[in-house]
Image: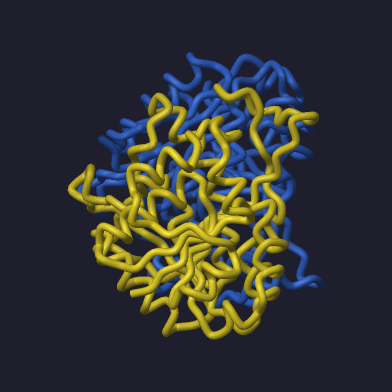
Chain colours: A yellow, B blue
């Protein structure tokens, strides 16, 4: 399948590499490919330069957001939450119309001038916007009415989203939410190819609020586990 | 042990009945005991009158919030989120000073005039206040600086908090957060007596934000499971 991964951060790289390994034709999108390749320093999250990653994955194509979106039959949004709506709406609408777009972004607002009062090892903690009465997933769907937005992946670190069987026998739960049933069916198929067996459909895209707002509990759990990224949520039920 | 349960809602009843069963001396607190006993209609959540519950648990004492708090060595706050700070600070401070107070309230704001846009079977969905940059747990701790507040129970329906072994072999995770280590130790002991074996300490009371904000995901999961209250979260990790 032709799949576009928009963004070059750590999460986007996990999906691009895994999708290529699964035999898909993967195009990675970025704002300015030359600038992305020219970077030699880690980004604000400490992720190494994209050129280093690409050296180990020479069969991945890197192009603009617009060209990547146009090339994909399915699109994964890995653009950071604060820039997602602006960046996605700048893509010519024909490139995304009628397509499934998986959004896993958390709408974190970084503001180094106003440290978050929750102390974390990295000094400040972002806040969420939107929160509670709206979600980034819903904002993206409203901004792209001809695209089928599915919120997924967001409750877990992306390196284990693509390899759930790495711990706990893979028996944890992945949530999906969206207003288009056929789109959620396509995403569930992709998730099964990643190794997921317990996929829980939370219904309409309104559920993206709870999925995004889980990020603070997710962060606290990771800290409680010593900074681990290797954990998941299993919904235990009768 | 002498334990006070403040509140007469469905959650408070679960704890009062379980604690009595475990052999504790339980005092239930309410604003106006006579008015509570005189009610003959279900409350806004559909919970039957307290008098019906008390008829089945005649060995439980019902008194005012102040007298219940004074009688308890450990206090469980089952007052609804919107009224918790106001009600707790109206209790003479000596009755709560130096004691452990377990808070499991979600700071839901009910406003029937402004329906929440998330459609639920019960028509409207409350929003959260505080949210994201503060929590009810922290508000209560600031309002009661001489009390040791521990946030717990909040990520699960209370009928299974008191009986975790009812499903999944009891192998799910209970979170605690608070600024007082000795208080968290006491709460963990209580949780083990309820049947919990996987108790995850999330650190300081700042983590109450994530625990309370999980409520929207919790609601969505319950709806996805057909309105079930019988589910829990297991943090699967390496």
Screen quadrant of the C terminus of chain B = top left
Q: Please tell me in which quadrant of the rendered image residue A141 appears.
A: bottom right
The residue that appears at 69% across and 63% down in the rendered structure is A85
Picture residue at 31% right of the left edge, 60% below the top:
A20
Residue nearest the observer in this picture, B238 or B25: B238
- Residue ID at (53%, 61%): A63
User: In the image, B170: left or right of B104?
Assistant: left
Q: Which sits in the foreground, B84 or A169?
A: A169
Q: Is residue B34 visible?
A: no
B172 sits left or right of A47 in the view: left
Residue at figure coordinates x 66%, y 38% from the top left:
A126
Give the image location of residue B83, x and y in percent. Answer: 74, 46
Residue A38 is left or right of residue A191, and the answer is right
Question: Looking at the picture, how far across and down is residue B156, in whole percent?
Answer: 45, 50
Position of residue A161 relative to residue B30, above or below, is below
Q: Quadrant of the N terminus of chain B?
A: top left
Where, by quadrant of the figure, is residue B66 drawn? top right
Residue B180 in the image, given as x and y percentages of width and height: 55, 17
Pick out the residue farthest to the left. A169
């Amino acid at each position: 399948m032709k799949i576009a991964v928009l963004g070059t951060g750590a999460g986007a790289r996990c999906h691009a590499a895994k999708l290529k390994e699964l035999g898909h034709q993967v195009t990675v999108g970025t704002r300015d490919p030359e600038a992305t390749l020219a970077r030699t320093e880690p980004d604000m999250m400490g992720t190494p330069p994209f050129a280093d990653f690409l050296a180990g994955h020479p069969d991945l194509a890197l192009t603009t957001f617009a060209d990547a979106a146009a090339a994909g039959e399915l699109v994964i949004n890995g653009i950071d939450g604060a820039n997602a709506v602006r960046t996605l709406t700048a893509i010519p609408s024909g490139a995304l119309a009628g397509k499934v777009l998986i959004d896993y972004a958390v709408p974190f607002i970084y503001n180094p001038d106003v440290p978050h009062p929750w102390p974390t090892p990295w000094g400040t903690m972002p806040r969420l916007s939107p929160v509670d009465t709206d979600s980034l997933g819903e904002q993206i769907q409203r901004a792209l009415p001809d695209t089928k937005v599915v919120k997924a992946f967001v409750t877990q670190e992306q390196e284990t989203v693509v390899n759930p069987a790495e711990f706990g026998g893979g028996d944890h739960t992945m949530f999906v939410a969206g207003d288009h049933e056929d789109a959620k069916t396509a995403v569930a198929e992709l998730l099964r190819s990643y190794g997921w067996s317990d996929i829980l459909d939370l219904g309409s895209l309104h559920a993206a609020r709870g999925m995004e707002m889980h990020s603070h509990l997710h962060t606290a759990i990771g800290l409680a586990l010593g900074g681990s990224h290797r954990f998941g949520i299993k919904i235990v039920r009768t």
